[in-house]
Amino acid sequence: MDWITGITRLALGRPAVIFLITLLVILGGVFAIFRLKTELFPDIDLPVVTVATTYPGASPDAILEDVTIPVEDAVAGVSDLKRLHSISTENLSVLIAEFDYGTDMEKVEQEIAASVTNVVLPSGAKQPTVDRIDLADFPIIFFSLLG
C-alpha cells in the first residue's frame, strides 16, 4: 500500500506532472496508430490447392471409385506434397492438397493441372477444376433479405 500512497500524493501534489505523463501516453498512442500497419485480411499465400470434379447423377461410391481415386493417384505424384485429403459426395469429388509454406504455389498449381488433365474420367464427369485458396476471394459481409 506504500507505493499507492506515493502515487496518490504525486498526483495531488503535482498535477502538471500527471498532465504531461498523460499527454505523452496519448501522443505515443496516436503515433503508434499511424505507424502500425495492419490489414483485415493480410496477403497470405496459403499452401493449399483444391481439385473439384463434378459427376452429375453419380452416387458417393461411384464418385469415389471412378473420380476421386484416379484424381488422387494423379495428384499424389506432385512434388513437395505434404497432405492429401479427399471428399466424395453425391455429384462431387473434392481433393485438398496441402504443401509446406514457402512452396511455389503457381508452379504446384500448374503441375497439378497438368497431371489431372491426363486422368481418364467417366463420360458424364466434367473436367477437374484446380484452384488455390485465396483469402481475398472470400466476401467480407453477407447480406440476406427475408420477406
Image (cartoon, rainbow, N blue to C red):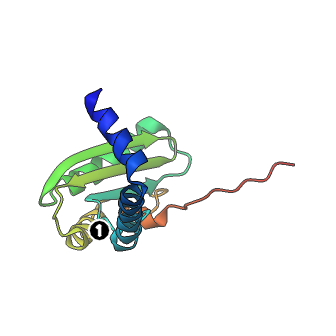
36 or 134: nearer the eye?
A: 36
22 or 144: nearer the eye?
A: 22
Residue 71 position in % (x across, y down):
29, 53
Residue assigned mark 1 = 113
Residue 36 position in % (x across, y down):
34, 68
Q: In this view, does 52 lie above or below 5?
A: below
Residue 87 position in % (x across, y down):
39, 42
136 or 75: nearer the eye?
A: 136
Q: Is 147 on the left-hand or right-hand side of 8? A: right
Residue 134 appears in the rendering: no
For this orientation, the residue located farthest to the right is: 147
Q: In this view, does 110 lie above or below 73?
A: below
Q: Is 132 on the left-hand or right-hand side of 104? A: right
Residue pictured at 49% horizontal, 52% vertical: 55
Q: In which quarter of the image is residue 118?
A: bottom left
Residue 25 position in % (x across, y down):
37, 60
Residue pictured at 25% horizontal, 59% vertical: 47
Q: Quadrant of the N terminus?
A: top left
Q: Is mark 1 on a helix, strand or loop?
A: helix
Q: Is 89 on the left-hand or right-hand side of 121? A: right
Residue pictured at 79% horizontal, 53% vertical: 145
